[in-house]
Amino acid sequence: MSGVLFKAACPDCRSRFELAAGALRLAIGGSRRTTFYSFTCPACDSAVRKPAGERIVELLTRGGVRTLRLAAGAPQSQTP
């Protein structure tokens, strides 16, 4: 989906801006705590990470944001 822009804000410098889908990353985990989106602020270069609820996940996914599905707890290896 070309040309989609998302409104975002930086909690550090308080700038407001629009980002293309390629500037955002979405991580979907097994819980609300582990589901978030991230980007780098174009104004102050801070790494920003914000929680993503179901609606945000849907909007970002439909808009073409690259998505990473986080694996649920991998089995621990046991030492004999």
Image (cartoon, rainbow, N blue to C red):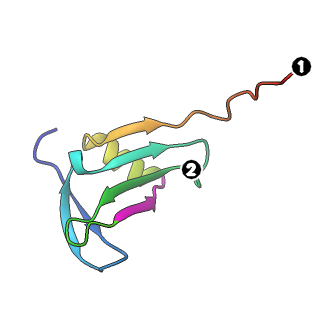
The residue at which mark 1 appears reads as 80
Relative vertical location of residue 41 with respect to residue 55 in this rendering, above or below? below
Q: State how far apart marks 1 and 2 are (Cα).
A: 32 Å
Q: Residue furthest front?
A: 80
Q: Earlier in the sequence, mark 1 or mark 2?
A: 2
Quick one: label 1, few (<14), some, or many (20+) residues within 10 Å?
few
Secondary structure under tag 1 reads: loop
Q: Which residues are magenta?
A: 47-53
Q: Is residue 24 above or below residue 79?
A: below
Task: Find disc 2 in the rendering and name its residue.
Answer: 34
Q: Position of residue 75 (x, y in %)?
A: 73, 27
Q: Nearer the viewer, residue 52 or 38?
A: 38
Secondary structure under badge 2? loop
Q: Amino acid at mark 1?
A: Pro
Magenta-span inclusion, residue 26: no
Outermost residue on the top side: it is 80
The image shows residue 63 at horizontal and vertical percentages of: 25, 44
Q: Is residue 25 left or right of residue 5?
A: right
Q: Residue at x 36, y 62 (%)?
A: 47
* Quarter of the picture holding the N terminus: top left
Q: Position of residue 45 (x, y in %)?
A: 26, 66
Residue type indicated by callout 2: Thr
The structure residue drawn at horizontal position 42% and vertical position 60%, both measured from the top left corner, is 49
Per the image, is 51 magenta?
yes
